[in-house]
């Protein structure tokens, strides 16, 4: 089993959650232990986090424990394999929870065209346009 940190469209109540995390074990709300830059960007208004620890804000999200075979679907939803879209390890924790090294999805700066917001700590934006509506 693997721990996955989600901060955007894979969170409960957002479009990718039922496609990628339905039935996964929810471990609770967490946040990054270091600040990261997260913004809304792109023509489809996607939440995107850059792997620049120490820059931005501590990002709140959700932690899930998933079976390794579920990662292929999560990678597909997060465009892993396309240039500048990848997964990495990220340290997260919650109120009273220990530090956890989880999988986190990142984008590189070329995805940030255009940028629609400043740094965010909690994704709640509803402008995301899912692939099936683009």
Image (tube, rainbow, N blue to C red):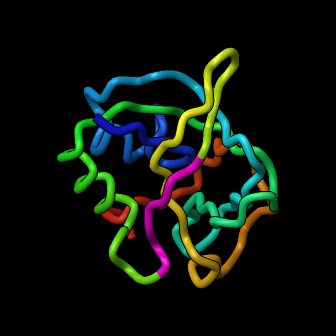
**Which is more toward the observer, 91 or 75?**
91
The residue shown at (45%, 49%) is 103
Is 88 part of what is drawn in magenta? yes
Is the residue 90 above or below the residue 18 in the image? below
**Which is more toward the observer, 87 or 18?**
87
The residue shown at (62%, 20%) is 97
Is 89 part of what is drawn in magenta? yes
Magenta stretch, main secondary structure, is strand
Q: In x, y percent, where is residue 71?
A: 27, 50
Residue at the extreme left: 69
Residue 12 appears left or right of 22: right
Residue 39 appears left or right of 57: left
Image quarter (top left, top right, bottom left or bottom right) of the N terminus: top left
Residue 59 appears left or right of 10: right
Is the residue 67 above or below the residue 125 in the image? above
**Which is more toward the observer, 94 or 15?**
94
- Res 3 quadrant in image: top left
The residue shown at (80%, 58%) is 54
Q: Which residues are magenta?
A: 84-90
- Res 75 quadrant in image: bottom left
**Which is more toward the observer, 134 or 121?**
121
The residue shown at (18%, 47%) is 69
Residue at the extreme top: 96
Image quarter (top left, top right, bottom left or bottom right) of the C terminus: bottom left
Is the residue 111 above or below the residue 118 in the image? below
Q: In x, y percent, where is residue 53?
A: 73, 59
Q: In x, y percent, where is residue 99?
A: 61, 31
């Amino acid at each position: 089993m693997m721990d996955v940190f989600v901060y955007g469209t894979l969170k409960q109540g957002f479009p990718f959650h039922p496609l990628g995390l339905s039935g996964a074990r929810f471990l609770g709300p967490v946040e990054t232990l270091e600040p990261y830059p997260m913004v809304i960007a792109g023509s489809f208004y996607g939440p995107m986090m850059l792997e620049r620890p120490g820059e931005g804000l501590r990002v709140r999200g959700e932690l899930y424990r998933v079976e390794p075979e579920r990662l292929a679907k999560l990678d597909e939803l997060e465009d892993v394999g396309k240039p500048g879209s990848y997964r990495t390890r990220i340290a997260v924790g919650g109120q009273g929870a220990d530090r956890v090294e989880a999988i986190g999805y990142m984008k590189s700066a070329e995805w940030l065209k255009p940028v629609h917001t400043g740094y965010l700590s909690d994704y709640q934006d509803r402008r995301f346009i899912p692939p099936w509506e683009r």
